[in-house]
Amino acid sequence: MLRAMNLQALIFDVDGTLADTERDGHRVAFNAAFAEAGLAWHWDVALYGELLAVTGGKERMRFYAERHDPAFLARADADETIKTLHAIKTRHYVALLEGGGIPLRPGVARLIDEARAAGLRLAIATTTTPENVTTLLKASLAPEAANWFEVIGAGDIVPKKKPAPDIYHWVLARLGLPAEACLVLEDSANGLRSARGAGLPTLITTGIYTAGENFAGALAVLPDLSGTGLADIRLMHGIKNS
């Protein structure tokens, strides 16, 4: 029997975990960027669900072009255009966030409040850009909410994105905690693989695009956090580490 390790930190994914950002946020912003740039690309709801198998917006655009518009990748400026498109997409996405169009998922705000009151440390591990993270927190929680998170690992801060464990190793190193002292909240199989690759206990809250994925190895798989509080999460973590 291993000695139980107390829960000291919660690490949150962002897209699909903190908020349902993918279908009505990122997808809409990508399409706006394509239209602004004069590209005849359009990602409908079903196609975007398939593209989510690739993590990272720039990587997702390249993946799409390889399969649907190889002539685009043959352009001398393809790499620079992808970077520009991503910047335009981020601008549209931030505007959606600032307009209050993407609320937090059920139970998220309450869990964060409970964790702060209990003195737990908070962190974020995501492939989305830092600006997307801070804008979502400011618009959906409080103007100073980004300061509640001791570590924010976001964007291109590590070379390999999820499902590689790099972003979680990066966050753990800055928290200075062993994996067993933390609990991750994710929504996708890629996120679960990433967190488990760093040895982190992981709770899944499924979304519209991830409900049918394989979550073997998760502490639990829930539709959302509406019926789950910090006491429940401490119990899950304690069972895992006992």
Image (cartoon, helix red, strand yellow):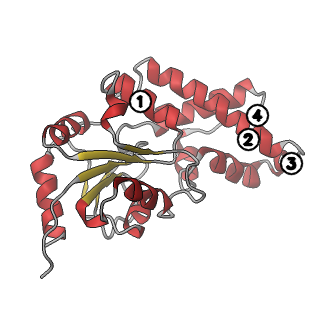
Q: Amino acid at mark 4?
A: Ala
Image point 55% across, 56% down: which residue?
Answer: 161
Q: Please state which of residues 173 and 107 is positioned toward the viewer in this rendering.
A: 173
Q: Nearer the viewer, mark 1 or mark 4?
A: 1
Image quarter in which the C terminus is found: bottom left
Percent position (x, y) of residue 120? 20, 46
Identify the residue position indicated by label 2 in the image. 82
Q: Please state which of residues 207 and 171 is positioned toward the viewer in this rendering.
A: 171
Image quarter in which the N terminus is found: bottom left
- Asked whether disc 2 touches disc 4, contact meaning CB atoms under 8 Å apart, the reply is no
Judge left or right: residue 239 versus residue 10.
left
Camera sees residue 110? yes
Between the C-alphas of marks 2 and 4, the distance is: 14 Å
Q: Earlier in the sequence, mark 2 or mark 4?
A: 4
Q: Earlier in the sequence, mark 2 or mark 1?
A: 2
Q: Please state which of residues 149 and 20 is positioned toward the viewer in this rendering.
A: 149
Identify the residue position indicated by label 3 in the image. 71
Image point 30% across, 60% down: which residue?
Answer: 177
Percent position (x, y) of residue 240? 18, 69
